Image (tube, coloured by chain):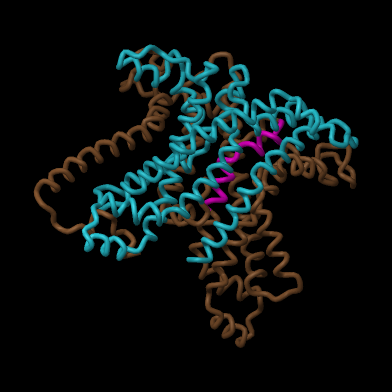
Chain colours: A brown, B cyan
Amino acid sequence: MATASVGVRSVRRPRPLGRRIRSLVLGIIGYTVLLAGALSMLVPFIWMFFTSFKPRDEIFRMPPVVWTTHYTLQHYIIALTRGHFDTYFKNSFIVSGSTCLLTLAVVCMAAYAFARLRWRGRDITFLIVLGTAMLPGLIALIPTFLIVKGTPFAGGNDMFGRGGTGWLDSYPGLILPSVGGGFNVFLVRQFFSTLPRELEDAARVDGCGEFSIFRQIILPLSKPVIAVVALFTFQGSWNDFLWPLVIVQSDRMRTIQLGLTLFRSQHSVDWGVLMAGTALATVPTVALFLAMQRYFVQGIALTGIKG
Amino acid sequence: MVLPSHWVGIANYQRMAGDTLFWKSLKNSAYFTIGSIPFGISIGLLLAIVVNSALKGRNFFRVVFYLPGVTSTIALSMVWLWLFDPHFGLLNAFLHVFGIPPQAWLQSTSQAMPSIILMSIWEGVGGGMIIYLAGLQGIPVHLYEAATVDGATSWQSFRFITLPSLQPVTLYVLVTSIIGSFQIFGPIYAMTDGGPAFATTTIVHQIYINGFRYFNMGYAAAQSWVLFVLLLGLSIVNLRLQVFGFMAE
């Protein structure tokens, strides 16, 4: 990376005065544009926080009150009590946390089996797993819904998955369909394949079993890729909307994203409470991003997706 | 809640051919895609070039531009719904400063889609920036050094080294953006629910409405297949780029 950060600018040689002035002017213009851009990125976030702390009568005023001296937490209190955002937040946390942990377990073990173990049909299975990464997730929406609804013995279903609602409107229904991911398996397998085999061979000579090798040698060496998968899975699950929208029916199972969209159906929107709820939905992933920027950048470069 | 199923042959596909809303949703999806991608890509590239230079506080700018990328689309949609509010929204207040009359934004049939496009560009430029940044950092420095020795101007370096080197990255960004744009749903559902007068209904919005509001799963599944076929070629290109791109590292 040492060479990589050297940009176009730094390789130029000293130039005549005229060109230096020109580049100075260009620099000032560039900086101004950049600052204006950064400001326009931040203003929606800032406005969200301002609105969430402003008293009601100041929210509905034109021209808008930018600086308020009457900060209030009432919108947050309303959101968390009457608005049920305490439940929505908890649900989102349970669903994202479980999805993340289960995904790590499944993906790492599958990746180990594809990278290190020898078994019949391994390569063709790997191709099939990778092939699932090719489908836009949305294509599987309706089949997945019908499968979750037809889960045997769940939600009043008989052994053929008929008669009840299966895993609709439940934690397993929210969590399990999002666990795994073909592209995650691919990423982790590629990483495992680059690890030297000498350590494992030595451990095997010492009588170490297959699972201990996986747990005590491979996993500790693979922290970077595991961090990327964990971050993106948590973030993707926290921000997921379409799947919860489709399977959640009762208020006590709503995730925070679903809670936000409830406001749209109101006759007149209570913007203060809505912005408080939006702030609650925003803070966890933004905090995670700020704390673990390095892994995010790595991950985006690898996968190129919005989590 | 799901109606009993029976075999209908190709009835769902025949119905689709005469479904004006489905055709409208295809057109809207194309409108959204064509309206957002050129801006998204060019601004993303521009930002990447700027934050790749030896600039004070470049890490700050990188973080700021990518901030919407980690935030949920629904939360951002709610914030923009508030910004777009015709009576008390910040955007109309901003226009007022320049003497421009208030706009209806999402509540006008002609402005609703451009408003959603504006919000989506804002949301997506950071992602493009980071991918282009990775691409820029992969260009060997000696190319620029050789060009400078030969007396190339910075514009020529950009035109004949940077741009051609970024071609694979551009293809990748283009393909993933098209796939993503054709699947836009969150902002549509949260901000307009396809309205006003179906001006913003997209393919996925139609799939959702048919499948989960009218509980016509068969018809919705048939529409999903159309979307799948539309995106299949791009998905294959995308997977190849991802897989081989990774292997090349």
Asked whether, in this view, residue A68 is left or right of residue B112, the answer is left
Q: Residue at x 56, y 33 (%)?
A: A86
Specify start and end residues of the magenta stretch as a single range.
Answer: A231-249
The residue nearer to you, when weighing B217 against B202, is: B202
Query: Residue A218, percent across and down?
Result: 56, 72
Asked whether, in this view, residue A131 is left or right of residue A306, the answer is right
Query: Residue B205, percent across and down?
Result: 65, 30
Q: Quadrant of residue A26?
A: top left
Query: Residue A158, percent across and down?
Result: 89, 43
For residue A248: magenta? yes
Residue A121 visible from this viewpoint: yes
For residue B76: magenta? no
Residue at the far left: name it: A17
Give the main secondary structure, helix, strand or loop, of the magenta stretch: helix
Q: Is residue A112 above or below residue A89?
A: below
Query: Residue A241, percent across and down?
Result: 61, 37
Q: Residue at x 56, y 80 (%)?
A: A197
Give the quadrant of the N terminus of chain B.
Answer: top right
Q: Quadrant of residue B148?
A: bottom left
Q: Is residue A213 above or below residue B201?
A: below
